[in-house]
Amino acid sequence: MKRIYLIIAILISATYQQANAQGCVAIKGIGGICNRPSEGGSWYLDLNSRYFKSYKHFVGKEEQHERVEGGSNVINHSYELDATVTRVFNSRWSMGITLPVLGFGRSSLYEHDGKTRHSTQSFGIGDIRIAAYRWMFDPKTSHKGNLQLGFGLKLPTGNYTYMDYFYKKADSSVLGPVDQSIQLGDGGTGVTFEIN
């Protein structure tokens, strides 16, 4: 058990860096996978859901209360469902594929006519993730704890040019790409690393 804590402490120390707030709602949820060790031939279905609403504005550490009070704030609603199917090959190895279903809404003044609050939406499949997982210690002998590492690939399957209508004038609308915070994907392929 002591070696598990030592490995975790080393990994955390090696990857530590100062983090600052990103200032936008660009993060998509990625459901975690951590199945208990089992014998090969097992299948698991994990469903993770997330709802998130953002409506506050910050410049550095200072909150701009006047944006909310005056009604000029941007409001984002994020609904996410991650469906993950995991195949267990043996007591240590497994592989999972995650399919995110996303529904986003964003309302603002400045993206439209500047006077009336209007909304844009997006809905669909996000960026799919495929990952392999390994329990680092033999589950048959490590009863007090274990460490699972995962390594995967995020594929650009989500639409990153989703379009909706913007109301620039009271009597007309213009079709254009929604804000990046409610796009279904980011258009890039990525590598993922997990510790459970």
Image: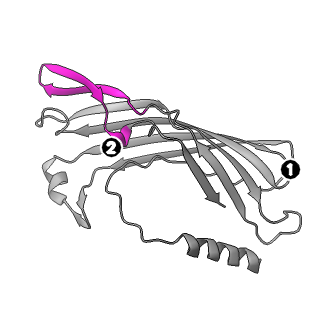
The residue located at (24%, 59%) in the rendering is 58
Q: In this view, does 113 lie above or below 142?
A: above
Q: Is residue 119 above or below residue 55?
A: above
The residue at which mark 1 appears reads as 90
**Which residue: 41% across, 67% down?**
19
Q: Identify which amino acid the numbered label 1 is placed on.
A: Asn
Residue at the image position 39 percent from the left and 48 percent from the top:
26
Instruction: Using the image as rendered, state which of residue 118 and residue 190 is in the foreground.
Output: 190
Residue at the (22%, 28%) spot, across then down:
166
Q: Is-magenta flag for residue 163?
A: yes
Q: Is mark 2 on a helix, strand or loop?
A: strand
Q: Quadrant of the C terminus?
A: bottom right
Q: List x then y, in percent, for residue 20.
A: 37, 66
Mark 2, Cα crowd under 10 Å, few <14 / some 14-19 / many 20+, is many
- Earlier-in-chain disc, 2 versus 1: 2
Check disc 2 and report the residue beneath it: 76
Q: Which of 115 and 173 is in front in this view?
A: 173
Question: Quick one: SS at disc 1?
Answer: loop
Q: In this view, does 5 lie to the left or right of 136?
A: left
